[in-house]
Image (cartoon, rainbow, N blue to C red):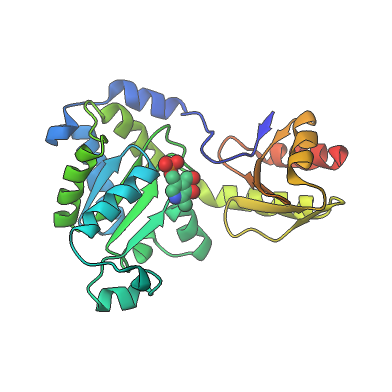
Amino acid sequence: MIDLRSDTVTKPDDAMREAARDAAVGDDVYGEDPTVNELQNRVADILDTGAALLVPSGTMGNQVAVRTHAERGVISPDRIAATADAAHELGVPVHLDGARLFNAAVAHDVSAADYAEHVTTVMCCLSKGLGAPVGSMLAGPEPIIEEARHHRKLFGGGMRQAGIVAAPGLAALSNRGRLAEDHRRADRLAAGLDRVDGLAVEPPETNIVLVTTDRPAEQVLGRWRDGGVRASQFGEHTIRCCTHWDVTDDDVDGAIDAIRNAS
Ligand SMILES: Cc1ncc(COP(=O)(O)O)c(C=O)c1O
């Protein structure tokens, strides 16, 4: 089965499993897990934000950021649509949901820090294209991240010997360099699928390929699945295919063939 549902379906590789086994751990709720601290420092360096906090998921990273900012300023509903610059001018903090921040940076040929510099806080996921089994990072200036640490505990996100989670996260950071491969494969997949009758595909920007179907997406997905390809329904006539490190060049070609035969 070639699984294109999401870049979250990846299995941790040997490097991650070994890193988890060998991780030095401590109680991270007390800030005493050396592996978590190393991961947080590393991400803060990469994004040049001053500090970062490991959270169990992207959803929690966003919630913790909103809770942290909500106590710092007034965000009225009619100002939510304002741009980041206008928000800063008003003294309103801006949070960036950067679940796939590193993919975006690769796609636009800029550093992840170039994104982080415009916002107050940024959340990025280790568990998507980077392949870690668990974890997302909330990064921002040190005093804000210190407050976020408190809110993470209030939301039930305080973990104990979290080095087990942080160690594969650190190993995952070294996968940033290979995201371009996923993007190249997504391009190849998109071009191949666009030639299949009944499907239309725009060239993707990153590792996510959106396929428009002439028949209901649910029906099309069923046929793909029978042919050995899994993907996600994204709309009534839209299917999402995601390339990731468990998808090889041969898988892309195999998926195109299987989908053509299933159409
Ligand atoms: C843009 C975006 N933000 C947040 C999330 C939530 O991340 P998690 O599944 O780690 O909670 C996702 C998940 O796919 C996402 O795509």
Tell me the quarter of the image containing the C terminus.
top right
Q: Is residue 168 above or below residue 181?
A: above
* Residue 237 percent coordinates (x, y): 73, 51
At x 68% / y 41%, what residue is drawn? 249
* Residue 222 percent coordinates (x, y): 76, 34
Visible in this render: residue 36? Answer: yes
Q: Is residue 165 left or right of residue 151?
A: right
Q: Is residue 241 above or below residue 28?
A: below
Residue occupying the far top of the picture: 21
Q: Is residue 224 above or below residue 200?
A: above
At x 51% / y 47%, what residue is drawn? 178
At x 58% / y 34%, what residue is drawn? 246
At x 17% / y 27%, what residue is drawn? 26
Q: Is residue 17 left or right of residue 52?
A: right
* Residue 7 percent coordinates (x, y): 54, 41
Tell me the quarter of the image containing the N terminus.
top right
**Who is closer to the viewer here, 156 or 170?**
156
Q: Which picture quadrant has residue 68?
A: bottom left
* Residue 153 percent coordinates (x, y): 20, 38
Q: Is residue 44 left or right of residue 29?
A: right
**Who is closer to the viewer here, 187 or 223?**
223
**Who is closer to the viewer here, 124 or 198?**
198
Q: How many marks?
A: 0
Q: Is residue 247 above or below residue 24?
A: below
Visible in this render: residue 176? Answer: no
